[in-house]
Image (cartoon, helix red, strand yellow):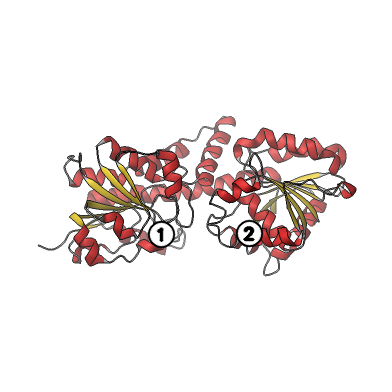
Amino acid sequence: MRVMIHGSELSAATAAAALSWVGHQVCWQPSGISWEELQRSGWLAREPLLTQYIEEALARGQLHIGDQPNPSDSSLDVLWLALSPGQRDEASRLVEDATEQLGPRSIVVNNSTFPVGDTERLEAQVADRGAVAVALADTLEEGRAWETFTRARRWLLGCDDDRAEQQVRELMRAFNRRHEVFQRMPRRAAELTKLAINGMLATRISYMNEMAGLADTLGVDVEHVRQGMGADPRIGYEYLYPGCGFGGPNFSRDLMGLADVQSASGRHSELLDQVLEINEHKKETLFRKLWTHFHGRLEGRRVAIWGAAFKPGTARIDQAPVLTLLRALFAQGVHVRLHDPAALPAVREEVGDHPLLTLCEGEPIEACEDVDALMLVTEWKAYWNPDWQALSKCLSERLLLDGRNIYDPQYVAAQGLHYRGIGRRADPAH
């Protein structure tokens, strides 16, 4: 098929690579940025396999970036929109510009997270050409984009036309052979479902974080509570891990999008307000634990932070807990030594050359030299099994604050350290 893809998001790059990989003729138009700039951005190179497949498709001629389709055959089978939520107006313009290339067998695939009802709005622009628009929810995971596209567990397809469904299935046939991955529903239902899923996941995380706070107050290890809740088949274990808050561009935007949908419908959601408020509050959890341990006397203290990215496997820090944490620490005059395997350039761009911040690009243990305490914010695998003997010598106040509960409290205490997790704690025996 002849496919035109618009967007400079991860979803656009992945679709361009994957669809050209399986033989479609793809033209990818990054929005507002050149291919050369995208290559320099870093996030593309850090996404496993993606750059490799893009370069191979370019070499084969299956993929063209920034080029218009061949003038002698300018019709399009698929117009694929993978734009950011802020590019809603641009989506309308792009569809308008492509109208002459669309025909009765063409489909517009809305792979963007726009307000509920926008797929219908896009279809109205091409109705006189006989083209149909479908909603295909963006379900990619950063750090696993190639895998989650080419071996998807499911595709949430919003489609009100049988012929359009058949066209989408043919487009994605190479990725639908192991088992049936398409779940079809009306377009508005699919658009709302995408937002609702992330709303539910965020609610589970926030509820578990509330339980962790209560466990702290009552002197209960929240891990027992988590295991007990997860063992109930009505609940399960997924997204029941307490932590120091969630971030990320897609998760946060989808929550705000769902809140906007609620408000626009006249049904304001106090539950969503609470979820968002709890999450912002939890981003300060490690700071409050540090404050409590040192009885509020933080000026001049030195701490190491392991992890800045909003999750392992990405270089993004959009709405990441580390940003809230840094602001709180700087306000108290705390010197910070920050290590992250991938996100330091993003931190440097966001925070600048701050006098209280040192970015450490070497080994994680090097960030802990001459500090009072260590804060674990992002659970990169490189942090899971440190040299405990060396770490104990580095931390002058022997304090470890675990924002993701990846360590065993009793084991850490046995190394002579004070452990403070999210709803968990242990102290060395005296």
Which residue is pictured at 60% across the width and 39% down the height?
85
Disc ID at residue 149: 2
Which residue is pictured at 71% across the width and 41% down the height?
119
> Which quadrant of the figure contains the C terminus?
bottom left
Residue 143 appears in the picture as rendered: yes
Q: Nearer the viewer, residue 330 or 216?
A: 330
Q: Position of residue 14 (x, y in %)?
A: 64, 55
Q: Nearer the viewer, residue 237 or 387?
A: 387
**Residue found at the far left of this picture:** 430
Locate residue 164 relative to residue 140 in the image: left or right: right
Say which amino acid is labelled 1: Trp
Q: For mark 1, give the secondary structure.
A: loop
Q: Position of residue 217 (x, y in %)?
A: 23, 48
Say which amino acid is labelled 2: Phe
**Residue found at the far right of this picture:** 72
Locate residue 131 relative to residue 197 in the image: left or right: right
Q: Quadrant of residue 232?
A: bottom left
Q: Position of residue 209 (x, y in %)?
A: 36, 49
Decide: few, some or many residues near mark 1? Use Cα within 10 Å; few <14, some 14-19, many ≥20.
some
> Which quadrant of the figure contains the N terminus?
bottom right
Locate residue 82 relative to residue 313 in the image: left or right: right
Q: Which residue is mark 1?
A: 380
- First-in-chain label (1 vs 2): 2
Residue 411 appears in the picture as rendered: no
Decide: few, some or many residues near mark 2? Use Cα within 10 Å; few <14, some 14-19, many ≥20.
many
Which residue is pictured at 67% across the width and 47% down the height?
111
Question: Nearer the viewer's eye, disc 1 or disc 2?
Answer: 1
